[in-house]
Image (spheres, rainbow, N blue to C red):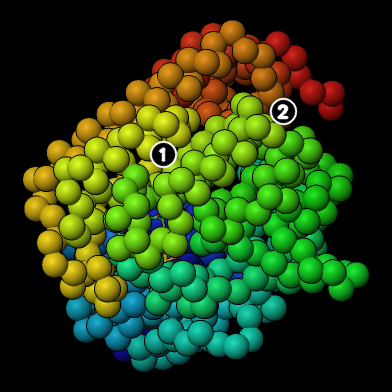
Amino acid sequence: MNRSDPKKFRIKSFGCQMNVYDGERMSEMLVDQGMSSAGDGEDADLVVLNTCHIREKAAEKVYSDIGRLRDKDGNSPMIAVAGCVAQAEGKEISRRAPSVDIVVGPQAYHRLPGLIDRAKTGKKALDTDMPAASKFDVLPTRKKQARPTAFLTVQEGCDKFCTYCVVPYTRGAEISRPWSDLVNEAKALVDGGVKEITLLGQNVNAWTSEDDKGQMQGLDGLIRALDHIDGLERIRYTTSHPNDMTEALIAAHGEISALMPYLHLPVQSGSDRILKAMNRSHTTESYLGILSRMRKVRPDIAISGDFIVGFPGETDADFEETLAIVREANYAQAYSFKYSPRPGTPAATMEDQIAPDVMDERLQRLQSLLNEQQHDFNRTALGRQTDILLERNGKLDGQLVGKTPWLQSVHIIAPELAIGDMVDVTIESAGPNSLQGKVTRREAA
Ligand code: SAM
Ligand code: SF4
């Protein structure tokens, strides 16, 4: 059956921030092709599900979402499955969900327009290549942005092969985007109204490239170059790997005021035995050493992390060590997950898989400690004067929500202000997940 030419599209991105970035690039590309994004409540005739494969639950979600796209007569819009599930499951997706028209992997989405043309003729279109030519060379330049904050992918893929993780298989080998492409993209984002850029990579601090003078640079060098862009007020980066945390990057936190005092540095477990089985190639000691050197140059830095509980073979004693490292590191915020066996990864076939009820109990204990630490961290902001960048409207009349340098959400009532304004506030109350503030000064226009 031939399909009509799609005019309105909707992109739903799941999972990590790199997927959000990819979703934005796909959207800009489809607009460049003459399509428009479907508004709230409006029907789309192309739906792109930009999927995540990191845990089983996330991966399975795509199939229920596809089912929901069918109307009461069994018709659905043109459906494209993109992202890491597309890469990992390929043809299997069309077998399990025949209403899917297009399957496109994270390194091939720049070919979406050609795949749409094929799908229009009623044929299935599949592209999970990892082409040598980079998608970034053909994607359109960044345009005016709807928000004052933007992601910028600087590094993709991973060569570290942690034994639980699918990323090296779904995103491919580690690559760093070239210096000049990134400086130009950052400038285009700032020209498009962006005031804060978050540099992204699976191991963002492994980024390295020659600069315009032919000198090798690491992430600290790139951050220093971006710091010279007029109008770029805040720079962040995520996610870092402990082994790629250079002394130069740590020092940059003490020297560059636009580099925000926030570090997301996953440790995964507090047990060296489990870290070894995970193939993490760092120890709890080397991890804590980084935090202490970082706190020396930037005492107020907010530390964030990722944890996996219930990795195969994790004993009660191993788990107690995870609680111990959390107490020692003292997190401002953190993500924690139950281990999810992923097909094709070494850990999935390890002995001593942990029972679900044990994982549940461990996750609950870990999360209650992390939540307590997050609330304590938020309370330290009480009475503090700080700048916030307003990012979105709140639920109440005249309410706006902005972020502190430490990535906390602050709610203010200020009908006279707008998204994109940078304002000084005094923090008046602190909950576990967000803060309330009062405006004390607005930046000069
Ligand atoms: N490259 C980053 C690092 O090494 O810390 C992390 C990237 S990964 C996309 C994000 C997080 O997902 C990991 O830090 C880990 O905590 C979690 N994760 C990855 N595989 C997982 C699995 N099989 N089960 C549960 N959580 C997992
Ligand atoms: Fe996955 Fe490990 Fe690579 Fe992070 S470093 S993306 S957890 S394999």
Image quarter where ligand 1 lies: bottom left
With respect to residue 201, does 433 lie above or below? above
For marks 1 and 2, give the one nearer the viewer.
1
Instruction: Write down the residue under mark 1.
Output: 334
Q: Earlier in the sequence, mark 1 or mark 2?
A: 1
Q: Position of residue 358 (x, y in %)?
A: 11, 45
In the picture, the quarter occupied by the N terminus is bottom left
Is 398 on the left-hand or right-hand side of 231? Answer: left
Looking at the rendered structure, the kind of residue marked 2 is Met
With respect to residue 273, does 155 lie above or below? below
**Distance of label 1 from label 2 (alpha carbons):** 26 Å
Please report the residue visible at 15 percent of the width from the left and 38 percent of the height from the top: 361
Q: Position of residue 436 (x, y in %)?
A: 52, 16
Secondary element at image label 2: strand
Instruction: Write down the residue under mark 2.
Output: 422
- In the rendered image, the residue lying farthest to the right is 213
Q: Position of residue 227 (x, y in %)?
A: 81, 46
Q: Residues within 10 Å of mark 1 (few under 14, many from 20)?
A: some
Looking at the rendered structure, the kind of residue marked 1 is Ala
Is 37 on the left-hand or right-hand side of 126? Answer: right
Q: Which numbered circle lies on residue 82?
A: none
Please report the residue visible at 33 percent of the width from the left and 68 percent of the height from the top: 163
Q: Residues within 10 Å of mark 2 (few under 14, many from 20)?
A: many
Task: Please name whichever residue, 124 or 386, is drawn nearer the observer in this view of the structure.
Answer: 386
On the question of residue 81 being in view, the answer is no
